[in-house]
Image (cartoon, rainbow, N blue to C red):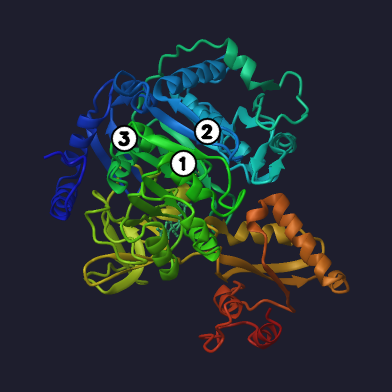
Amino acid sequence: MSNYHIKHLEEYYQVYRKSIREPENFWEEIAEEHFMWRKKWDKVLSWDFSKPEVKWFEGAQLNITENCIDRHLATRGDKTAILFEPNNPDEEAEHITYSQLHQRVCKFANVLKSQGVKKGDRVCIYLPMIPELAISVLACARIGAIHSVVFAGFSSSALATRINDSDCKMVITSDGSYRGSKTIDLKGIVDDALEDCQGVNSVLVAKRIHSEIEMKAGRDHWLQPLLDDASDVCKAEIMNAEDPLFILYTSGSTGKPKGMVHTTAGYMVYTAYTFKNVFQYREKDVYWCTADIGWITGHSYIVYGPLCNGATSVMFEGVPSYPDFGRFWEIVEKHKVNQFYTAPTAIRALAKEGVDHLEKHDLTSLKVLGTVGEPINEEAWHWYDDNVGKKKSPIVDTWWQTETGGIMISPIPFVTPTKPTYATLPFIGIQPALMDENGQEIKGNQVDGRLCVKFPWPSMARTIWGNHQRYKDTYFSAFENKYFTGDGALRDEVGYYRITGRVDDVIIVSGHNLGTAPIEDAINEHPAVAESAIVGFPHDIKGNALYGYVTLKETGESRDQNNLRKEINQLITEQIGPIAKLDKIQFTAGLPKTRSGKIMRRILRKIACKDTSNLGDTSTLLNPEIVQGIMDEAL
Ligand code: 7RM
C-alpha cells in the first residue's frame, strides 16, 4: 500500500492511525519515496514545545527547486508547469513548461547572484501575479536566499516595515500592475518605502505595464536585459533540512507583523503530500488556486505543493469582477480546470451576481472545489455546491494558517463525506485538541473550545524572524505543551471539526487577517484623535467589515465628522493598505474600559453587530455609564 495517495475512507483512518502512533516511521516513508534528496536525514524528528524547538529530517540535504522542477524534466519536460492567465482576457495565456521554467529559474538565479545575493540573504519580492513572481520565488530557493514576498496591495509603509524587519538587501518589483481596469504604480510605492530602508542596495524591476518610471542610478535595474545576458545553467545550492526557505509576514493582534519562518524539508514534504491528497491531483489535471502568491495559500498551493507533484498550476493576474463577474468561469472553461480553490469572500461576491454568468460557461471539467481563509457560511457553501459543482464536485473546506504552512483540517475528496461549514477531519499526521478556559483538554465529541495542536507536523513555522520569544509567547504559552491556533472550533458527534473563528483580536476581512492594534495605531496618529477601538461586524461579502469607535481630542470636536472619517481612512490606507479601511466610524465620548484600563471590545463588538439584548457583565467596567450613549448613537 502506498500511503502517498489516499483513496478510501478506511484507508484514511488506517493511515491516520499510523501517522499518530508512529509519526517518525510514517513521515520517513513518505519522505523517502516521493522526494529527491542529496543526503538522507540522520533523525526524522526532534521537538520540544517548551522551548519551542522543532526539527524535521535533521541532517538531510536537498534543494526544493530540484524537487519542484529538475526531477520532472525527464518525464514532464513539455508539460505545462505554470499556466499564466493575464488580467486582460484578450491577452494570450502563457503556458510555461517544466523545461522552460527550469531555464527561467536558472537565469533568474544567476541574475540574483550577479547582484551579490548569497545563501541566507533576504530578498523582498513585491510583484503582481505575473510569472516573474513564481520564478523569482523559485530563483531565491535555487540559491538558498530567503524570500520574503509582500502582497502587492500593501502600502509603502507596510512594505518598509517588512523590508527592515528582516533586513532585506534586494527588492524585486515591477513598473506597475494591472488590477481589473486599473493600473497601480508599484515602483512608486517601492521608491517611497525605500526612503526608509537603508539596507536595500539593489532593486530589480520587471516590465509589466510599460509606464514611465524613475530608475535610480546604481540601485535600480531593469530585469529583462539582465536575464537576457544570464546563463541558463545554475546548480542548485545544497541546503540543510532546517535552513530557512522563506519568511512570510502575518498580522498579529498586537505589535508589528510577525515574520513567520518556514524551513526547507518539512515544508516541502507536507505541502506536497497535502496537495496530492486534498485535491486528488491526477497527472493530466489542470489545477487552479485563485489566491495571490503574496499569501501563504499561494506559496504552498500555487507554487511549492503543485510543482513538487509535477502539476499544472494556473496563475491568474486579475480579479473575479473584470471584465465581468463571469471571468472565473470563463477561465475554468478555457483551461478545463479540474480543481478550483478559492475563498469564501470570492464565493459570496460571485453568488450575489446570480447564476447567469455560470450558465454561459461549460464547467464540466471541475472535479474538486476548495475553500480557504475564513469560515464558510452555509448559504455560500450550498451556492458553491449547487451552482459551481452541480452537486458532483466535493467541497474541500481546508482549515490552516500562515503558521501551519499547509492544510491541517480538511476533507479528502471522494474519501471523506463532506458536511456544510465543517472542515471535517484532521489531515494525516495532525493531532488537534480542543481546550477549555482552564487549560484542560476537552475530550469526547459534541464539544467546543480553543483549537490547539498537540504534536509537531513537518510544515509548522519554526520561529518568528528575529523574535523567538514572541513566537513562544504567541503560540506556545496559552496552553502548556501545545500549539495554540488563535481559533475556536467545535467537534461534532462523529469527530468533524467546524472552525468558528478567531478568539483573539484578529479580524478576517475578505479573507485578509487584520490585527486590530496596527489599525488603531494608524488612527491614533491623526492629530484630532484621542483614542480608538476596532471591532468586526458581519458583512454580506467580506465576511467581516471593520467598525471603528473613535474618541476625539478637544481640539477635534469642532471638526466636520465626514472629513475626519475620510482622513482616518486615508491614514489607514497609507500605513497598512486599502484592505484595512473602516466601513463605519462612530465618534464617541469615551470607550468602555476595565479597571485595569483595557478596552472592552466584547461590548463594542455586540453594539457593532446590533446584538445589544444581552451585553453581558458590565459591572467590572470603570465607566459603565458611557455604554448607553454609544448604543444610542450606533451606526
Ligand atoms: C490559509 C490561511 C489563518 C486564519 C485561521 C482561521 C482562518 C483559514 C479557514 C479559516 C475557517 C477555514 N492562512 N481560516 N481557513 N477559518 N475555515 N477553512 O488563510 O494565516 O491567512 O489565516 O484564517 O481563523 O486562523 S492565514
Quarter of the image where the C terminus is located: bottom right
Which residue is the site of mark 1?
Answer: 334
Hey, which residue is sitting farthest left in the picture?
Answer: 1
Residue shown at 64% from the left, 57% from the top:
580
| Amino acid bearing label 1 | Lys
Compared to residue 161, the image places residue 61 above or below, namely above
> Marks 1 and 2: CB-CB under 8 Å?
yes
| Amino acid bearing label 2 | Ala
Which residue is the site of mark 3?
Answer: 284
- The residues tagged by marks 2 and 3 sit, at their Cα atoms, a distance apart of 18 Å
Count numbered badges in the picture.
Answer: 3
Residue 293 is left or right of residue 235, and the answer is right
Compared to residue 70, the image places residue 453 above or below, namely below
Label located before the other in sequence (1 or 2)? 2
**Quadrant of picture, ligand 1:** bottom left
Residue shown at 41% from the left, 57% from the top:
388
Quarter of the image where the N terminus is located: top left
Q: Name the residue nearer the viewer: 432 or 509.
A: 509
